[in-house]
Image (cartoon, grey):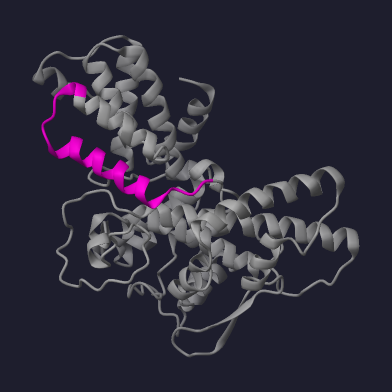
């Protein structure tokens, strides 16, 4: 196992082993609180609400998000919000004070704001949908050049196209949005909006699959929420959803915000330019590793072709040579998810091609651990990692069962 993968596994092991105390000494009590509040009894898109909350927390922790943002992920909808009606704490009585005493003032403030803004309008209509895919690709390139220039020479230019576009959407002083229930104005700093984009990436990646595609007629794979197929039957066929283009665009915009914030702060220091209040400068913004650290946009057509190739392999009985070809093409079209690599690794070990299996399985495991959740949600994140480690261990030992009972007897991972 290479060093990078070994390090990622070390970060993942406490979650795989349920070692909550190691992750955060307060985590066992927080989970118990959610359980006693009925979170495990509430329906959620891919299971129950409790599992979703803990999954989002895990994703954010694996992405190295600061503790306040990770805790917001753990409690992100407990006051109910613009997407779900799942109020576990009463926002109008002593619920806020109770939660504040458990997770701290900063984290509770994030939870509260996350629950009272119209996140659909804020994240999608007012930010993501303002950019085309090509524009995001170009602005990522330009912003990288700007960051390098600032780092090497200390020179910046606020009139650059990518900066002007971002500033027109999210100015340095932040924005005002409407409270979803009272209609009152709510101020959000630019860094707070960035944190909400990051949490929405984690939130969506954990719960989205083909059921939402059916609900919103997401045929084009852009997840624009234009359909209204409320008769879609849950949970559908369990097929991986066409959500990754949308998350890649969120990641790109998030990266642009982080780069603009870093340059803006540097300008404020060196030029003694105007400072603004309520900017949440202490709120740390980290870049998650997905989509090559949020520098790539997954094309909608490639996303669909890759998913369909994978699914064809899963549901149809094809010859091994055809399966290999289809899985390799799936991995080439969408190199950002791990499950197709693991299935390809199984094909390789089954045919005695152990070195090839090692290579693709290590890549698949890396991607699955980077995401912190599964893409093919028929199996859990933990299940996919266990399966991948099992294939990898056997590939290194150059062995694989040659009988059906042998496959069923697999299980121990060292």
Q: Residue at x 84, y 72 (%)?
A: 274
Magenta-highlighted stretch: main secondary structure? helix
Residue at image x 38%, y 62%? 33
Looking at the rendering, in which quadrant would you find the N terminus? top left
Residue 395 horizontal/vertical position (percent): 32, 15
Q: Is residue 310 magenta?
A: yes
What span is colored magenta in the figure?
296-321
Quadrant of res 329: top left
Image coordinates for residue 364, horizontal then vertical, percent: 38, 31
Whether 73 is drawn above or below 7: the answer is below
Residue 32 at what x, y percent from top left? 37, 57
Q: In this orientation, which residue lies closer to the viewer: 278 or 241?
A: 241
Quadrant for the C terminus, please.
Answer: top left
Residue at 75% across, 75% down? 277
- Residue 71 visible here: no
Q: Is residue 388 found left or right of 165 in the rendered image?
A: left
Q: Position of residue 363 (x, y in %)?
A: 42, 29
At x 22%, y 14%, the residue is: 351
Using the image, determine if residue 41 lies above or below residue 248. below
> In the drawing, does residue 122 fall left or right of residue 342?
right
Whether 396 is drawn above or below 120: the answer is: above
408 is within the stretch colored magenta: no
Q: From what the image shows, is residue 210 above or below residue 174?
A: above
């Amino acid at each position: 196992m290479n060093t990078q993968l070994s390090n990622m596994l070390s970060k993942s092991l406490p979650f795989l082993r349920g070692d909550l105390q190691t992750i955060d000494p307060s985590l066992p009590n927080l989970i118990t609180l959610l359980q006693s509040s009925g979170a495990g009894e509430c329906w959620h898109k891919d299971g129950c609400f409790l599992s979703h909350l803990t999954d989002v927390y895990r994703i954010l922790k694996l992405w190295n998000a600061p503790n306040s943002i990770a805790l917001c992920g753990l409690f992100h909808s407990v006051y109910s919000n613009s997407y779900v009606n799942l109020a576990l704490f009463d926002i109008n009585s002593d619920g806020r004070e109770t939660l504040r005493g458990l997770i701290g003032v900063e984290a509770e403030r994030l939870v509260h704001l996350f629950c009272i803004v119209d996140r659909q309008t804020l994240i999608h209509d007012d930010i993501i949908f303002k950019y085309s895919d090509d524009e995001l690709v170009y602005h990522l390139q330009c912003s990288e050049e700007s960051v390098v220039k600032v780092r090497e020479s200390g020179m910046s230019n606020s009139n650059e196209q990518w900066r002007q576009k971002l500033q027109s959407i999210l100015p340095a002083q932040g924005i005002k949005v409407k409270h979803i229930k009272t209609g009152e104005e709510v101020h959000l700093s630019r860094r707070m909006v960035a944190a909400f984009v990051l949490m929405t990436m984690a939130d969506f990646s954990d719960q989205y699959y083909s059921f939402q595609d059916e609900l919103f007629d997401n045929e084009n794979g852009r997840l624009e929420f234009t359909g209204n197929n409320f008769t879609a039957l849950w949970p559908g066929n369990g097929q991986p959803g066409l959500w990754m283009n949308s998350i890649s665009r969120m990641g790109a915009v998030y990266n642009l915000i982080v780069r603009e914030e870093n340059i803006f702060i540097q300008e404020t220091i060196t030029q003694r330019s105007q400072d603004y209040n309520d900017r949440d400068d202490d709120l740390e913004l980290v870049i998650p590793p997905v989509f090559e650290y949020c520098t790539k946009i997954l094309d909608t057509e490639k996303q669909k072709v890759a998913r369909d190739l994978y699914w064809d392999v899963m549901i149809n009985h094809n010859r091994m040579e055809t399966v290999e070809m289809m899985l390799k093409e799936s991995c080439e079209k969408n190199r950002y998810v791990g499950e197709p690599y693991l299935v390809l690794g199984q094909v390789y070990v089954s045919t005695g091609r152990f070195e090839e299996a090692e290579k693709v399985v290590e890549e698949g495991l890396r991607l699955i651990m980077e995401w912190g959740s599964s893409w093919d949600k028929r199996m859990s994140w933990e299940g996919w990692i266990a399966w991948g480690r099992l294939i990898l261990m056997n590939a290194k030992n150059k062995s694989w069962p040659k009988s059906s009972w042998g496959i069923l007897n697999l299980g121990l991972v060292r």
